[in-house]
Image (cartoon, rainbow, N blue to C red):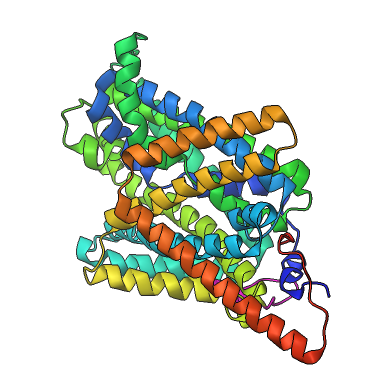
Amino acid sequence: MSDSRATKVQDLDRHLTLVPAAALAVTTVIGGGALVLPGAALQKAGSTALLGWILAAVITIPLIAVFARLGSRYPSAGGVAGFVQAAFGRHCAAGVEVVLIGTFGLGMPAIALSGGGYLGAVFGWSPAYSWVGALILLALAAAMLLSGGRVSSKVQAVLAAALTVGLAVAGVIGLANPHADFVAPALTAGAWEQALTVVGIVFFAFTGWEIIAFTTAEYRNPQRDFPRAVAISYVVVVGVYILVAAGVQATLDPNDPAAESSPVAAVIRVAISPTAASLVAVLGVVILAANLIGAMWGASRLIYSSASHRLLPRQLSVLSGSQRTPAAAIIATACLFVVVTGISAVGVMTPPTMFMVAGQNFFLLYLLSAVVFVRVAQSRTGRICGVIIAVGLGAVVVAGFQWLMILYAAALFGLGVLLSIRGSRRLTARENAAGIPVATSSTEGTG
């Protein structure tokens, strides 16, 4: 028997080519952190903060190399779960899918609430009503995705250009204005040691490539274009971050309170005028709207893939329209985000806590992907590199993670495995009752 649970993923419309794929990656990686983290890094390390950004960019290279390799080799709507299924079987993949749902379910509403705050700033709303802006952005993102992947990818290309140009201009203004005083960081051992303290602050800005792994089933040529899209987006993202960080460092004093809360806006205020600084709120809306669309795109494909494997209700794997859009999965994803946004709005969870849990879970997925890479590497050199990456990431988890957060991820993983085992047994029982031969492979890919 062919495994029908794994066939629907192939039906997604393969429309993504290199340029829109790279644009989607840029908008998925660059988020609200680009507007805040340069100031936090400056306050932590002063003139050596720029070295921290450079270190974080260098540390990210082997991590995204792993994703690029696995994404091109195992393209699927399951993303990281698809990698895990190829290496460790369906039950482990189901565990990862539930972890991912629990991660998206916190991180994406936090992005929406941040975007709602910027939207409120544009229209002069009270910060207490940021949840209203969040719901508006969630509705717009869902509507955009329901229009089809081809339309969404074109919109993402426009948004990617807008946010890239906007942030780059802010960085140039910071470096070139009359008040600028850029001091290049000293390349001493002490400076590099201080720069290491910045990496933990800014690393969240370098997450997001794990999300675009969920879109590989929609690439026309994932083996060729996915690694290229990752590489192009990496160059763009790092260039923008370095430029903005340098501009903030050149214009602001590390002791300036605005450096912590709104450094980019403070740069524009100092360099041009307080009135011009209000434009940063518009830029923030553009950045976070684009970020939310990309994240919801990835999350909805995860829901679709999980449903095609019967971990979630089968109705969520139905494709709609000529563009074969997973409309039911998109709607379910949006509804999940709306519910969590409402829970946060009444004070049960704060966006910083939601970001922290989601960020740590994504880091754990980097670690898991490195383990998969070790398992499937076809050369000794590849396996050695994978082991080095996995050990390094594991050391960071042991040294810096809160164990309560690790237990949260472990509980979600265990729930997914149990649901998969239970579903597999029920399916096997039905097939036996119908006299249908049972497929024996548990490591079949997701597409």
Expressed as whole percent of the image width and height from the top left, the position of residue 438 reads 79, 76
Residue 107 appears in view? no
User: In terms of depth relative to the viewer, which is nearer, 141 or 332?
Assistant: 332
Q: Quadrant of the C terminus?
A: bottom right
Would you say residue 323 sits in the magenta stretch?
yes
Would you say residue 150 sits in the magenta stretch?
no
Q: Is residue 267 above or below residue 155?
A: above
Q: Is residue 313 above or below residue 75?
A: below
Residue at left offset 32%, top offset 18%: 193
Q: Is residue 84 above or below residue 148?
A: above
User: Which range is magenta?
Assistant: 318-330
Q: Main secondary structure of the magenta part?
A: loop
Residue 49 appears in view? yes
Expressed as whole percent of the image width and height from the top left, the position of residue 192 reads 35, 16
Residue at left offset 66%, top offset 49%: 20
**In the image, 9: left or right of 306?**
right
Expressed as whole percent of the image width and height from the top left, the position of residue 412 reads 44, 64
Residue at left offset 61%, top offset 43%: 67
Q: Quadrant of the N terminus?
A: bottom right
**Quadrant in the rendering for residue 276:** top left
Expressed as whole percent of the image width and height from the top left, the position of residue 288 reads 42, 53
User: In terms of depth relative to the viewer, which is nearer, 30 or 275?
Assistant: 30
Q: Is residue 275 above or below residue 234?
A: below
**Quadrant in the rendering for residue 122:** bottom left
